[in-house]
Image (cartoon, rainbow, N blue to C red):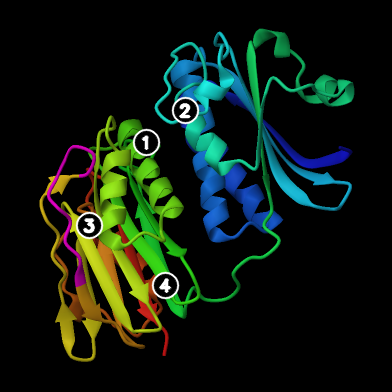
Amino acid sequence: MEVTRDHILSLPIDDESDIGICRRKGVSLATIMGFDTVKTEEVAILISELVTNVLKHGGGKGKILICQIEDENKRKGIEIWCCDSGNGIPNFQKALQDGFSNKNSLGIGLGTINRFSDEIQINPIISPTFKENYFSGIHDYKHCLRSLKWVPTKTWKGLINNLIIGAATRCHPMEQLNGDAYLVNKTNKDISVAAVIDGLGHGIEANLASERAKEQIILKTELPLDNLMNHVHNSLRGTRGAVIGIAQINTETNKLYFSGIGNIECFIITANGKKTPLSFGGIMGHNMRTPRVFEFDFNPGNTVCMYSDGITTRWSHESLNWSDAPQKNADYILNNYSRFNDDATILIIRYAT
C-alpha cells in the first residue's frame, strides 16, 4: 500500500511525565485531522497505554512516533509507532488478549491497544527512507509496535443530542497525571451517556484506573445502566479502583437515569427545584453493592451537574445562574472551589430548549 506521511512527531519516552506529553500531542493531531470526540478519546487511551507499557514493562525507555498517514485512496489516519528496549513478545496473538502479562515486553495493555486500533503490527517492515529519517538509532530498541486508526468517514455534527456540555478538570497540584476523568458519549440519536470518574488517590495508578474505566464506558455505552456499572466494576479488578457516577440521558423520552458508586456528587436543576440522585458506598473494582438505577424527568432547560470530591461542598447551587453557559459555570466552580490536595473534576450538561 502506497502511503504518504506528514505532521510527524518523534518523541522520547524516558519517565512518567512523557505519558501526558505524548497523549496531548496525539490528541492535538487527532483533533486537527477530524477525529470526533469519542475517537479522539480512544486515541488518547491508546497512546497512554503504549507509553505506560514502555515505562513499566518495556525496559523503561523508548520512543513514540505519531503522524498523519494518507493512502492511495486519500483516506487519512493517525499512525503510531512505539519502540522499547524490552525483550519483545514471544506470542503476539496471546498478548493481544486482555489480562496477558509479560514484564519483559509490551504485554499488559495490548488488548486495549488492539481494540482501539484499526490495524496493529509487531516489528513491521520499515521503508529505508522512513527508517533513515525517523528511526536512526533504532538498534537500541528490541521491539517496535505500529498502530493505525483511520479518521471516521462519518462523524457527529453539532450538539450531542441537544445537550450543551461544560467540563473542567485538573490534576493534583503535585502530580502530572490526572486521577479523575469524565466523558460524554453519544450512543444513538436519542441517548447519551455521561460520567465522572475518580481513581482512588492520585498520580499514575489513579490515572490508570480512571482511564480504564473511561475506556470501558466508551466501549459499552449501549448496555443498560446497571449492566454497564457491573461491566466497569469487573474491568477495574486489579487496579487501584475508582468511584464513578454515570448518567444516561434520553432526549426522546426526556428521562435521565443515574447510578453511582462512591462519593461522586450529582444533582439536577429543574423548573421545580433541585433533585439529588443517590450514590452508594463502595469502590468499583474492589467492593461494590448491587448497582441501583434512579429515574428522573429531564426536560429541555434542565441541567445535570456531577463532580468528584476534589470539588468542595462549600458552595450552593443557588449562587450560580444555571442559564449561563455550562462551561462558564464549570470553570468558575473549579477555579473557586477545588481542593489543593486532590484531583478535581466537574461536568455540567444542560438540555437545550
Label 4 sits on what residue type? Ile
- Residue 198 location, x and y as percent? 27, 48
345 lies above or below 109: below
Whether tag 3 and tag 1 are in contact, CB under 8 A, the answer is no
Name the residue carrying label 4: 191
Name the residue carrying label 1: 208
Name the residue carrying label 3: 311
- Asked if residue 289 lies in the magenta stretch, the reply is yes
Locate the N terminus and report the quarter of the image it occupies: top right
Question: Element at badge 1?
Answer: helix
**Which quadrant holds residue 256?**
bottom left
169 lies above or below 330: above
Whether tag 3 and tag 2 are in contact, CB under 8 A, the answer is no
- State which tag comes first along the sequence, 1 or 4: 4
Q: Residue at position x 75%, y 20% from top?
A: 135
Cα–Cα span, label 3 and label 1: 21 Å
Question: Element at badge 4?
Answer: strand
Cα–Cα span, label 4 and label 3: 28 Å
The label nearer to you, 3 versus 2, is: 2
Q: Main secondary structure of the magenta part?
A: loop
- State which tag comes first along the sequence, 4 or 3: 4
Cα–Cα span, label 1 and label 4: 27 Å
Range of the magenta residues?
Answer: 284-294
Q: Alpha-carbon neighbours of circle 1 within 10 Å: few (<14), some, or many (≥20)?
A: many
